[in-house]
Amino acid sequence: MELTSMIVLVAVVVVVGVAIAAALVVGLTRRSRRQREQRAEQAQTLRTMASAHDDDIAASRSRLENAQADAERAHAEAAAADHRVAEAERVLAQEEAQQEDVLRQADAIDPHTGKAQSTGHHAAAHDAEAERAGAEAPGTTTGSHRA
């Protein structure tokens, strides 16, 4: 082969190699751009899907706030009910103590006359008091008057 044809052959091979390399670079660049575009589309789709749930999230947040407000009201009502129970227990204990005091006064004035009349109600009040105090054994006293 002649030198000229060898140079032409090398030049052709170099030109073909450069053309192939250029084609590869262009192909890879297009592929990379296409992938970026696909990722951008996918990200936009995800953002659109996420923003579609904004109303659902707002509704859930509103339900949560309503439930919290209901719970706060219920706690306040329960606290008020506990206070009413405590007050009723205090009033009951006071009334029973006053009744006990009156019966003691009556027994102190005349220990024999009123016992038969007051024993039934007085004993029932004492038994109820004993139950609240821990239900002592029958026949024992809690320090209150019993006929």
Image (cartoon, rainbow, N blue to C red):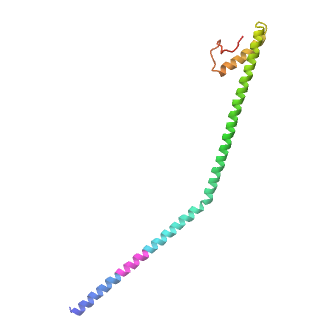
Give the overall secondary structure of the magenta segment: helix
| Image position, residue 36 (x, y; %) | 46, 71
Front residue of 47/69: it is: 69
Q: For residue 74: magenta?
A: no
Front residue of 80/134: it is: 80
Front residue of 95/39: it is: 95
Q: For residue 24: magenta?
A: yes
Q: How many marks?
A: 0
| Image position, residue 22 (x, y; %) | 37, 81
| Image position, residue 112 (x, y; %) | 77, 6
| Image position, residue 130 (x, y; %) | 66, 18
The quadrant where residue 35 appears: bottom left
Vertical relation: 8 (above or below) 88 = below
The quadrant where residue 82 appears: top right
Part of the protein shown in magenta: 21-31
Vertical relation: 20 (above or below) 59 = below
Looking at the rendered image, the quarter that the N terminus falls into is bottom left
- Judged left or right of residue 9, residue 120 is right
Looking at the rendered image, the quarter that the C terminus falls into is top right
Vertical relation: 125 (above or below) 72 = above
Vertical relation: 43 (above or below) 15 = above
User: In the current view of this chain or complex, which residue is farthest to the top?
Assistant: 112
Q: Residue at x 40, y 75 (%)?
A: 28
